[in-house]
Image (cartoon, rainbow, N blue to C red):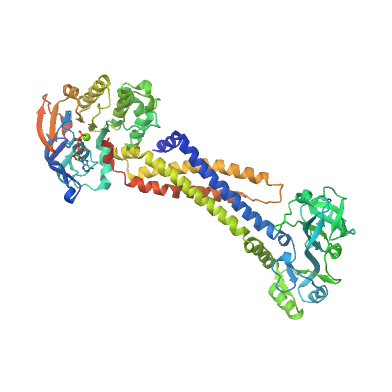
Amino acid sequence: MSILAWKNLLHDRVRLIVTLTGIVFALVLIAIQFGMFLGFLDTAANIVENNSADLWISAPGIPHVNGGSPIQESKRWKALQVPGVTHTANFAVFFVNWKLPNGAFETCQIAGFDLDSGMGGPWNLVAGRIEDLRGEDTVIIDDLYKTKLGVHNIGETLEINGKRARIVGFTHGIRSFTTAPYVFTSFKNAQNYIPMREHETIFILLRTARGANLPAIRTRLLATIPGIEVFTHDEILLRTRNYWVFGTGAGTTTLMGAMLGLLVGIVVVAQTIYAATIDHLKEFGTLKAMGATNGQIYQVIILQSALAAVMGYVLGISVALAIVGSTANTDLLIKLPWPVALGIFGLTLFMCMSASLLSIRKATTIDPAMVFRG
Amino acid sequence: MQPLISVSQLVKEYGSGANRFRALNDVALDIHAGQVLVLMGPSGSGKTTLISILGGILSATSGSVRIDGREIVGMPESQRPALRRDLFGFIFQGFNLFPALTAEENVGIMCKLKRVPQPARAAAKLLESVGLADKRNAHPADLSGGQKQRVAIARALAGQPRILLADEPTAALDSVSGRNVLEILSGLARQNNRAVIIVTHDPRVLEFSDRIVTIEDGRISSDELRRHIPPTPGDIA
Ligand SMILES: Nc1ncnc2c1ncn2[C@@H]1O[C@H](COP(=O)(O)OP(=O)(O)OP(=O)(O)O)[C@@H](O)[C@H]1O
Ligand SMILES: [Mg+2]
């Protein structure tokens, strides 16, 4: 019976093309929208994710890592007195204006970190040295933003918030969800660029002893230092991610796009498979008259959908991978890891199977006696 | 000798209430293996209704139809596919071939459905038996009407069913191919001790028939034996 499914599918060329187009369209929509969602999850809090601090101290009630406000640097010394805290470091993330060669401004975010502890520093360095940030007015940016920021080589100079800055290195792939690229520099340099008073910082990063009891340390910190909030790594990560991905609607929109893709896919495929079933009703009637059971007819219909699903998947995932590949060197991150690709295969099968349900219902009603009637 | 098919007091009504219509009324008929039975009658007399019931694809309203000793009136729907698969071959006026499949695949799919061992080989052999060995890879669209009906006959013969039911098998054919198809069908009854039942308006069929049953307004109006058919041991179930 499988031969009938296969050959009928290939026989109706136009319908096959319409079906495959539907599946491919749906699949690409699902893959890209979901890939963008994953990309958002990745970029929204990458500055936290790649930070090795165990605890973060900030001003109370900050909405996310990009929305901190200055606190007294002296709180560091109090924090260091709490048992279990082994290192402390300043860290500043702050929006600044970057002056382009043509005189226009781009908004950037300074990430000023403590070079000695390394907490909050850049990753994926592809040119220059992090150590060079010890020099005055030095910065490292990501090579994905070279054009946007109008600089292309190490040694070029420019202005940040009216102060001189010199490029000493490039990272690759540190994207920013907010479209304001990160500019890495030492905390010392950052104090020049950020409108903070002396002895102020935005965050105090803590490293704790191995196996330290973080909730207990937090309780002590809050008890001894007034006017702060304390986060674990995961807490500030989640707060930041949730703010950008869900608070802004970006995540919901992409997820809805993916759902829409699924819906469009089911409707298009259901429609074409149903039309195919109607066209082959006489054949199914003949099979039934000649002794095929309903189950055997369903098999043909289901197999047809499954074959269409496999063909559509191969085409669709190839298109999606090509699109993902073409964005690799842009500031938009679309992720399509293999478990997701595999999941999409499952989804494609599900989509095609549910699309064939309508056809199966129709096949149940085929009266084999129809075969003798004209 | 027990007949292969035994019909008595058969009634078929279509519709219900005021729309109720009696298409078959008290039909009785015994059919033996080895016979070519031709069913004739005016349009709307109930011929198609009768062979649909005989073939287990339409349920009767009342009466009895025994196929090979088994009562099929009142048989549950779930048992009917197996009955049709194991006992019958069907041939239709419109051929009902699968257009996407080649001649051999058309026959092969039925061999598979009927669980014939080595279905591909069996299909090739059946095509050969209807003189179409050279058309095995042709699609129905590339065959003439007569050739299509021969493919359909080969398909109906998959699994060597004991009963062949054909509804107007020659109506769509020219006289030469119609004759050829009738020759093949009548040969099949005699060679393999089958019952072959042909519904037709075609007078040419008479020379190939052993028995002519005429039906009018749902009743058998004449039953004429044209040749003496000796009962054969194959009749016994
Ligand atoms: N599904 C149905 N519902 C209602 N009435 C039906 C149905 N099928 C057939 N009939 C009626 O039953 C009667 C017998 O129909 P049937 O098709 O058996 O006739 P037939 O002898 O095969 O005619 P023809 O030579 O035109 O094929 C006709 O009056 C027909 O209108
Ligand atoms: Mg008829």
A110 on left or right of A237: right
Q: Tell me: residue B162, above or below residue B58.
A: above
* On-image quarter of the N terminus of chain B: top left
Q: Tell me: residue B213, above or below residue A182.
A: above
Asked if residue B118 shows in the view, the reply is no
Quarter of the render that holds ligand 2: top left
Asked if residue A18 shows in the view, the reply is yes
Q: Can you name the residue that lies furthest to the right here?
A: A136
Residue B102, by quadrant, is top left
**Residue at 55% of width from left, 51% of height from top?**
A343
Q: Can you name the residue that lies furthest to the bottom here?
A: A223
> Which x, y percent locates residue A266?
48, 49
**Residue at 73% of width from left, 78% of height from top?**
A222
> Which x, y percent locates residue A238?
66, 65
Observer-nearest of B104 and B13: B13
> Which x, y percent locates residue A69?
76, 70
Q: Can you name the residue that lies furthest to the front here?
A: A103
